[in-house]
Image (spheres, helix red, strand yellow):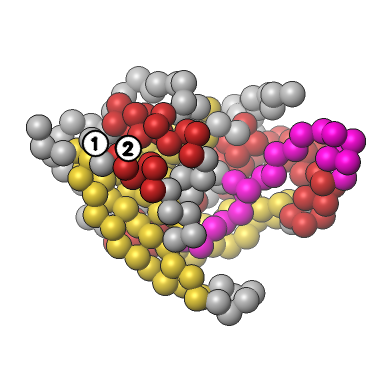
Amino acid sequence: MAVKDHDLDQPISVLIDIAIKKFGDVEFEKVVVGDVSLEVLQIKNMQQYIDKLMDKTRSGKKISLPLWAKVWPSSLILGYTLTKFPLTKGSKILEVGAGSAVNGLVLAKRGFDVTITDIDPDALLFSKINALKNNLADSIAISRTDFTSDSLDCCFKYIVGCEVLYDEIGFASLADFLADHLAEEDSAEIILAIDQKRQARKFFELANEQFAMMKSSAKYTDKETGDENIINLFRLKRKNP
């Protein structure tokens, strides 16, 4: 059964009540990205919620894990990059597959107008709550967008995305969506962050037809396991004709 859209034009207290009804206890967690401090809504006991979902699978029901709710290491690394990146003032910025919109919040804190997109209405609910909690709602537009079928009515100087390269079936559609929504100016670019475990070779083969790409990497240590992991950052610009 499809998830219904939420009415996001309501006070933050009402939106939080909707989140509690769906996910149980929620709480705001302080997230620091470079010199930007945010309050980000989290499911208080994610494991308990996931256990409930798993119980439903025993009766044959399909479930959707709220992976968008987690603040992923790649999101923090992308966010930090965006705090240092020389973005052109006044630029329109699009975040695809925004989840709880950490990177969109960072950009709005930097003074940019940001369009937040995701296909999941619950992700957009959390995004709107986060925008309101951080007093950034005037700088953030929220749109439910399926990049395999939808089109927005404008192009953007910058497009950012974190961990959006997880489903090979959608790679061609995503490459086309990015090409359709990136501004034509030479300095316009796309910035993507993914865990190195996701190679996403097929996407980059497709993207290579339209974009010139640069890759860099950042290491981080998993606080729980102590393992060292790598996040890959990709910058894509249109190829010269």
In which quadrant of the rendered view does residue 138 lie? Answer: top left
Up the image or down, 202 lies above or below 198; here it is above
Disc 1 and disc 2 in contact, CB within 8 angstroms: yes
Magenta residues?
55-77
Q: Which of 78 and 147 is in front in this view?
A: 147
Report the quarter where the C terminus lies.
Answer: top left
Mark 2 residue crowding within 10 angstroms, few (<14) / some (14–19) / many (20+): some
Q: In this view, does 75 lie to the left or right of 46?
A: left
In percent of width and height, residue 130 lies at: 56, 46
Image spot of residue 42 (x, y percent): 66, 53
Q: Is mark 2 on a helix, strand or loop?
A: helix
Name of the residue lying farthest toward the right: 59
Q: Mark 1 points at which residue?
A: 209
Which residue is at a point 38% across and 60% down the rendered structure image? Answer: 232
- The reply to whether residue 105 is in sight is no
| Image point (30%, 62%), residue name | 216
Quadrant showing the N terminus: top right
